[in-house]
Image (cartoon, coloured by chain):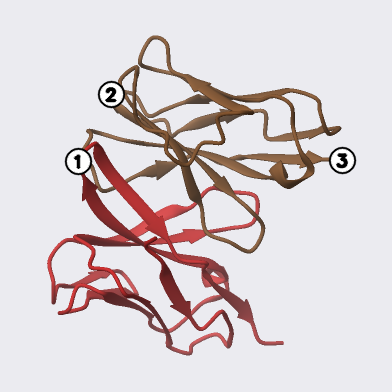
Amino acid sequence: GQQLNQSPQSMFIQEGEDVSMNCTSSSIFNTWLWYKQDPGEGPVLLIALYKAGELTSNGRLTAQFGITRKDSFLNISASIPSDVGIYFCAGHTQMEYGNKLVFGAGTILRVKS
Amino acid sequence: EAGVAQSPRYKIIEKRQSVAFWCNPISGHATLYWYQQILGQGPKLLIQFQNNGVVDDSQLPKDRFSAERLKGVDSTLKIQPAKLEDSAVYLCASSFFRGGYEQYFGPGTRLTVT
């Protein structure tokens, strides 16, 4: 089946640092989405990407839809403590019976002590 | 605008017992999804509804899981009987229309099966 590989699995951040994470797949997706999940909460949509090559920003977040449609990356600039959490990429495919989101396993962002 | 509501937030049951989860999607969202999220993994789709009809239940373990959305608004997911491996967070999400790429999630129900 379709699988998304996220890297890194986890990382430590220091306040003010820029952060990069990416998501790759052997399958082509029509849309890429990035979600953030805080402990005890559901995932919250951060950015949606609809076209290959598209670069989209949302405040300090920037995400790109890869040209091959098989990858995406997310950058966080000037990180702050509340950026800590789990970041999921999700690829969307249109099936004949509806649409389907496939999620990666997540990148855990922790604060460097 | 109110978000996706779910209850209960937490549930602890013994194996072989039954449990039910409730979800109320964002007002006006026709499509509703139930996901299972096992610790350390991303959400995995169990079932998708369009209004009150099932669009995709290919990943639902139908021998023990069932779901309904009778009036095309709120939905119930049931597990009967529960197994240890059903311990997970059950997330409900909704989107505006069937082809809607942007899904909005509720806070989830954390189920522990002992």
Q: Are marks 1 and 3 on the same chain?
A: no
Indicate left or right for A70 with B43 as reference.
Answer: left
Q: Chain of mark 1?
A: A
Amino acid type for the residue under numbered disc 1: Glu
Residue highlighted by disc 2: B28
Give coordinates of residue B22: x percent, y percent: 57, 23
Query: Which of labels 1 and 3 is toward the front?
Result: 1
- Give the mark, 2 or 3, whose residue is nearer the N terminus: 2
Horizontal and vertical percent position of residue A32: 27, 63
Residue at (58%, 61%) from the top-left corner? B41
The chain whose colour is brown is B
Front-lying residue, B84 or B34: B84
Within 10 Å of disc 3 (Cα), the crowding (few <14, some 14-19, many 20+) is few
Residue flagged by tag 3: what amino acid is it? Thr
Q: Which mark is residue A96?
A: 1
> Alpha carbon of mark 1 to alpha carbon of mark 2: how far?
23 Å
| Colour of chain A in the image | red
Task: Report x, y in % for residue B106.
Answer: 50, 39
Say which quadrant the N terminus of chain A sits in: bottom left
Mark 2 vs mark 3, foreground winner is 3
Q: Residue furthest top?
A: B71
Q: Where B12 falls versus B30 (above or below)?
A: below
Q: Position of residue B37 (x, y in %)?
A: 58, 50
Chain containing the residue with disc 2: B
| Kind of residue indicated by mark 2 | Gly
Q: Quadrant of the C terminus of chain A?
A: bottom right
In terms of image quadrants, where is residue A56? Answer: bottom left
Find the distance from the CA under tag 1 to the CA under tag 3. Answer: 39 Å
Helix, strand or loop for disc 3: loop
Q: Name the mark on residue B114.
A: 3
CA gap, disc 2 and disc 3:
38 Å
